[in-house]
Structure formats: structure tokens, C-alpha cells
Image (cartoon, rainbow, N blue to C red):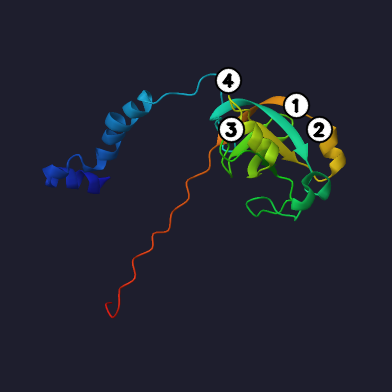
Amino acid sequence: MKEFFRVVFMNSRDLFRPWWPLVWLSLIVIPILALLPSKAQGQEATATSQPAVRVVKMKVTAYDPGSCCCGEYADGKTSIGDNAYVCDGVAADPKLLPYRTRLEIPGVGIREVDDTGGAMRKAGRQNPPVYHIDLRFPTHEEALEWGVKRLDVKVLSPPEPRQRRVETPKPKGGQR
């Protein structure tokens, strides 16, 4: 404490130096925080929750990656090369729901668009387009049990645009 008073009285320009964090906090930070919107009562944001971009009424059907549903295309891979036997994805028309779009499907959870099919693309070409997704199940029996449903599906996140690789032009001839 003695050093503090010695500095204050010996050098008058250092008078407010020990106090500046409190002044900055009370004059700048607290008023800015007061202007920020607060959470509405009853609404809590969690770290794992994702805001819904939109809610769309969709026709939701089911399939299995075996030859029963996929026929000659049953090679164990989705149309973007993922493992089809990992049942965490859906098939959709990529023009309506681009690949890697995350969907929250009632009664199922969050799934990602990683496949497509003729029925989904055909529904997307109708006027107006019909959003049709096809859930992937491990067995044909589970897919049949699901049936056909019309559900309000939350489209959580559109895919992030991929970085395009820019190639530098190669020097001609002997130039470097």
C-alpha cells in the first residue's frame, strides 16, 4: 500500500493507472452488455442444440442398403462414397437438399443427406417440388415397418461451401 501512495504522489500522471481496469469496466463493458439481447424466459440455448434454419413438410420413406431396395446399385456405398451400412444418413434430391445437409427428423433424430435415388429426384422435379427423403435402415424389415409418413422436418444446417483449389498456371517452356 505504501508503494501505491508513493507512486501516486510522486508522479501525478500515474494517478489513475491502478484504477483504469475498473473505469474501463464500468464505463464501457457493462453498458455494452446491458444493450445485448437477453434470452427470453423459458428459452435456453445449449451447446449441443442447433438452430433450425427452416421447417419443411416432407414425405419420409425408408430403405435398406441391400439388394432388396437398391437392386443393382447395392455396392455398399452411398452416392457420395460413404459406407451405406452405417445407417446415419438419408437419401434426398441433392438439388433441393444438398449433400451433407443435416436434418432433424421427428422420432428418428439428426441425420445427414448422403445419398440420392430416382424417387427423390422425380419428386423434386414436380411443380411445386415435393421434398422426399428416404431413411436408411439396416434391414429390409425395419424399412417396411417405417412405411410412408409425412413429417415436419427441421433443416438444421446447409452444407458449408467447399474450398475450391486454385491452381497456379504452369510456366511455359523454360520460364520459371
Identify the image quadrant of residue 32: top left
Identify residue for label 2. 146
Categorize mark 3 by other alpha carbons within 10 Å: few (<14), some (14-19), many (20+).
many
Q: Residue at x 32, y 32 (%)?
A: 29
Q: CA distance from mark 1 to mark 3?
A: 17 Å
Q: Secondary structure at mark 4?
A: loop
Identify residue for label 4. 42
Identify residue for label 1. 149
Q: Secondary structure at mark 3?
A: strand
- Depth order, front residue of 83/5: 83
Residue pushed farthest top? 41
Q: Against 19, is 154 above or below?
A: above
| Mark nearer the N terminus (2 vs 3) | 2
> Disc 4 vs disc 2: which is toward the camera?
2
Identify residue for label 3. 155
| Mark nearer the N terminus (4 vs 2) | 4
The reply to whether callout 1 and callout 2 are in contact (CB within 8 Å) is yes
Inspect this view and state whether residue 85 appears: no
> Disc 1 vs disc 4: which is toward the camera?
1
Q: Residue at x 80, y 44 (%)?
A: 69
> Disc 1 vs disc 3: which is toward the camera?
1
Badge 4 amino acid? Gly
Badge 1 amino acid? Lys
Q: CA distance from mark 4 to mark 3?
A: 23 Å
Q: Residue at x 84, y 46 (%)?
A: 68
The reply to whether callout 4 and callout 2 are in contact (CB within 8 Å) is no
